[in-house]
Amino acid sequence: MSGPSGTQEYSGVIPGGYAYYVPFEIVPPIYNGATYTAQVTACLVVNNAITPDCVSGSANYVEEDHPPATIVGTPYIVNSNNQEVTALPSNNTYRLVVSIENTGYISYTYTVEVSDSAGLISAQPMQVTVPAQGEATINVPIYVKPSNNPISDTITVSVYGDGYLDNSASIGINVLPSRPGPFTIVSVSTTILHEGEQNVITITLQNTGYTASNIEVTAVSNIASNVYAVPSTTQVDSGGDLTVTLYLTPTTAGNGVITLGLTYSWPFGSGVFIDTFKINVTVLTQLTVNLVSVDGTPVNALASINGQETNSLWVTPGTYVISVPGTVSISNDEQYVFDYWSNGYGTSTTITVNVNGPTTLTAYYIKEYYVSITDPVTGKSVSGWFNKGSTVNLPSIPPSISYNNGSRLVFQGWSCGYPASTTVITVNSPINCMAQWVMQYQVIVEDVISGLGSSTTITEGTYWVDKGGSFSINALNYKPNNSNPIIPLAYSHAVIQTSTGSSTTSSSVVSLSSINGPTTIELVWNYNLVNVIGLGAGVALLGLGIAYRDKVRYVTTMIIRRATTMVRRGGSEPGTAVRGVAEDGTRVYAQSSEELPVRPIEEGTRVRQEGTVVRSGESTVVRTNEEKEDAESSGQQKEETKDKG
């Protein structure tokens, strides 16, 4: 222990005297902190002589090896603005202000150390020299380590002398995150955008710092004139997520950048924090290939864009090879055939196109129909694919083909509805046509006149009847033309001759239900001798006796009024001929004993006709105009005969 030299009067009043002390020194070894008792005896000195009048006392003391120090007041922390703070944003450096008093009698250098309970404070030990019985203030730099969350902490300041703790003091602080944010990008929903369409991008950001408040977002881009940014909230806690939705319509294809700005603040200061993000994007443009017919009808087929079968593709600017099918089948008889490209790209099905923005190409097709027109009879045909609206010349088909055996084929038209007269058709749909023929068989109607020793056959009509068709006649409508001779004709029966046989019917109405081959209908007529009327029955004969001897024949002319049969009148010499003129002017010839049939050319007529055909034996005689005159003169001969009679 040491004290000031000499005698010192201590403050205070001691009744009856003074207090003195005597300096003394504690010599090593020093047991710092050990407690001792000092014994003091004071004797009265008179005339420099110590008297036995003494008193004694003692005092306890602690042995120390340095002057003790104490912390004056409470340490405190100031920021860079020299402001006292207790809320300390992390990741920052502050000053810890400590005042130390030296209570000893000599100047001494002390060591100051700082620690905290959360382990977030970092500070180096510092030394400070304090004069005896004086004070000194020290600024200890402290660094607050980063923290993502607010933490309550306690800082302890300790003052050491010669390695011994003299004094300590504690202060409470709040360690804060270093700042709100910064935010980091967690995810971006897409970086591939479509030109000319509104695109939506969702960006997720995480707050890595303290709570961020008053959040605002902005966005700009070099590929869109306007970018609208909408935050999901205006405040995000530490570690929380912020969702920002971007709306933009790119106007330029290619690579681009979106710059996102994030502005926010926090409750522990007036500072504004800004985070900036750059998002690289690629803007695609649309390449469309339309396949349509020339009349605008869509063609159901796919194009190929750089080998990918599609009619529309979002692409980056560049060069692309586009192909379309040359033929698109709709059915077995309908198809589309490529014709040409729009935009002047020509007529090849494969083209190369430079794409820098939205591009639409149109491949035009012509619709074709398959046409098959055949005639199996003549072997003629037309077939192939024809453009819609084009014309086709039909094969030239004869109206009929005769087989010269009582049968023929007659061209009826086409199975697709075109009549036989059609030569050119327009193709507006698939056409599958065959020539339509019908087999016809010849039906011949003949009058067979028999009796008086001979038989005469007269063809009354030739008809063509479709195979399987029916045929019906009334025989009375085919009565021979010589129905008014002296001896009348009577219908007997009909004989039906076919390739398979014959049949007979006595009915005057002959009906055939199905014609399946050439057919002859013979209408048999017989002379009715019962009705022969003699000269007294009103037959006036004017005999023109032109007699020729030997080889000259007799010719007898008769006027036939009502009878249906006549007999020869005149000489019986060979070669004698009888000539009769019917009342209607028809002239007939006959050899002896022959029947003299008279047939008008037209059914049911009994008038004078030029070229009336009759038969004389096996020969045919045609009545001429000259013979008509002879018939007229016969009337005069009749009158003359009456006169002679």
Image (cartoon, rainbow, N blue to C red):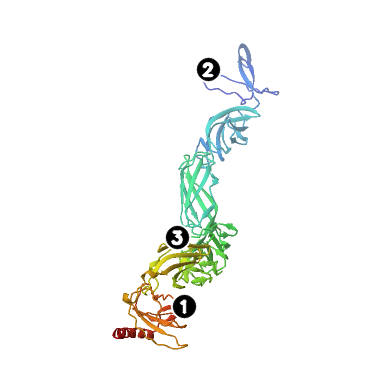
Q: In which quarter of the image is the N terminus?
A: top right
Mark 1 burial class by Cα count in 10 Å: few <14, some 14-19, many 20+:
some
Q: Which of 241 and 460 is in front in this view?
A: 460
As drawn, which residue projects farthest toward the left?
643
Q: Which residue carries the number 2 mark?
A: 14
At numbered mark 1, what does the secondary structure look like: helix, strand or loop? loop
At numbered mark 2, what does the secondary structure look like: helix, strand or loop? loop
Residues at marks 1 and 3 touching, judged by CB atoms closer than 8 Å: no
Residue type of the residue flagged with mark 3: Ser
Residue type of the residue flagged with mark 1: Gly
Q: Which of 88 and 476 is in front in this view?
A: 476
At numbered mark 3, what does the secondary structure look like: helix, strand or loop? loop
Residues at marks 3 and 2 touching, judged by CB atoms closer than 8 Å: no
Mark 2 burial class by Cα count in 10 Å: few <14, some 14-19, many 20+:
few
On screen, residue 127 versus residue 413, left or right, reads right
Q: Nearer the viewer, residue 126 or 302?
A: 302
Which mark identifies residue 371? none
Q: Quadrant of the C terminus?
A: bottom left
Determine the CA span between mark 3 and mark 2: 177 Å
Residue at point 33%, 84% (across, down): 632
**Residue 236 versus residue 430 in the image, above or below:** above
- The image quadrant that residue 40 belongs to is top right
Q: Which residue carries the number 3 mark?
A: 513
Residue at point 49%, 44% (across, down): 243
Which mark identifies residue 617? 1
Determine the CA span between mark 1 and mark 2: 209 Å
Q: Is residue 74 visible?
A: no
Residue type of the residue flagged with mark 2: Ile
Q: Position of residue 111 (x, y in %)?
A: 62, 32
Which one is in front in this view, the residue at disc 3 or the one at disc 2?
A: 3
Q: Can residue 65 be seen in this view?
A: yes
